Amino acid sequence: MPVILPCFALASLAGFILITISVHLLRPDLDVVRNQMSLYLIGPWGHLLQSGYCLLSLGMLALVFGLHGSLQPRARSVVPLLLFGVAAVALCVTAYAWMDMPGVPVTMQGRLHRHAATTTFLAAAIGVNWQAMAFRLDRSWRPHMVWALPWAMLCFLSLSLLGLCPESMIGLGQKSVIVVILGWLGAVSLCQLRLVRLQETAER
């Protein structure tokens, strides 16, 4: 399995994090705790965050396709490919279909944004759990289940608890879910890169 896929996945995650932090610093008019990420897509520097969303989409695809190619045949499943694919497409739709601003009538674009964002979170949360469960069928990945599966379950739990977050802290709650999912993607990408390099060294 080419080493370029986990490298690209890591670079994409790092790029998204850097862009997101930069946009937050460039938008002091928005409240980090109260305002959702979607509001940062609208107005100044929104195009930069849109590119970050698309970059993250490509990174998720690189990760899941890299994993699919590196896992032993019995551990491979088309389900994570489909789930991460849906999450990646939905994330791009989320980036370019703006949410409705507070206090304005609901629009078709706003509905599309809301459904796309929900689909992204659900597909990603289910995808990481399905992929983590598949690690038990691969000799190299099985030892990593001790942290990968609980972390994946935490991703789903944090998403489930997001609905209990008060309106005044919905921005912080949403961003916390994103951080937990990004952390899992980053940790698995690092492990994948390490395993690929170990395999390349063994084959020399």
Image: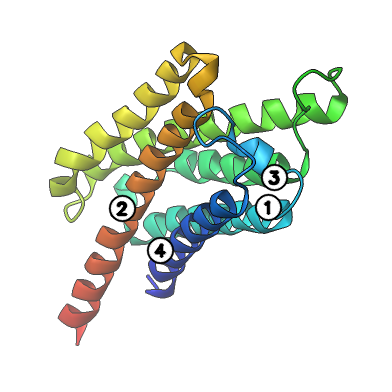
Question: Residue shown at 86%/23% (left/top)?
Answer: 107
Question: Residue shown at 54%/53% (left/top)?
Answer: 25
Q: Secondary structure at mark 4?
A: helix
The residue wearing badge 1 is 50
Q: Secondary structure at mark 3?
A: loop
CA gap between label 4 and label 2 equals 10 Å
Q: Amino acid at mark 2?
A: Val
In this rendering, position of residue 189 left or right of residue 12: left
Upstream in sequence: badge 1 or badge 3: 3
Q: Secondary structure at mark 2?
A: helix
Q: Position of residue 114 (x, y in %)?
A: 69, 26
Upstream in sequence: badge 4 or badge 2: 4
In this rendering, position of residue 77 left or right of residue 101: left
Q: Nearer the viewer, residue 15 or 112?
A: 15
CA gap between label 4 and label 3 equals 23 Å
Which of the labelled discs sits on residue 41, or is there none?
3
The residue wearing badge 2 is 188
Task: Select label 4 or label 2 by which is in front.
Answer: 4
Q: Amino acid at mark 3?
A: Leu
Question: Residue shown at 60%/40% (left/top)?
Answer: 86
Q: Position of residue 163 (x, y in %)?
A: 49, 14
Upstream in sequence: badge 4 or badge 3: 4
Q: Is residue 200 above or below residue 99?
A: below
Task: Select label 3 or label 2 by which is in front.
Answer: 3
CA gap between label 1 and label 4 equals 19 Å
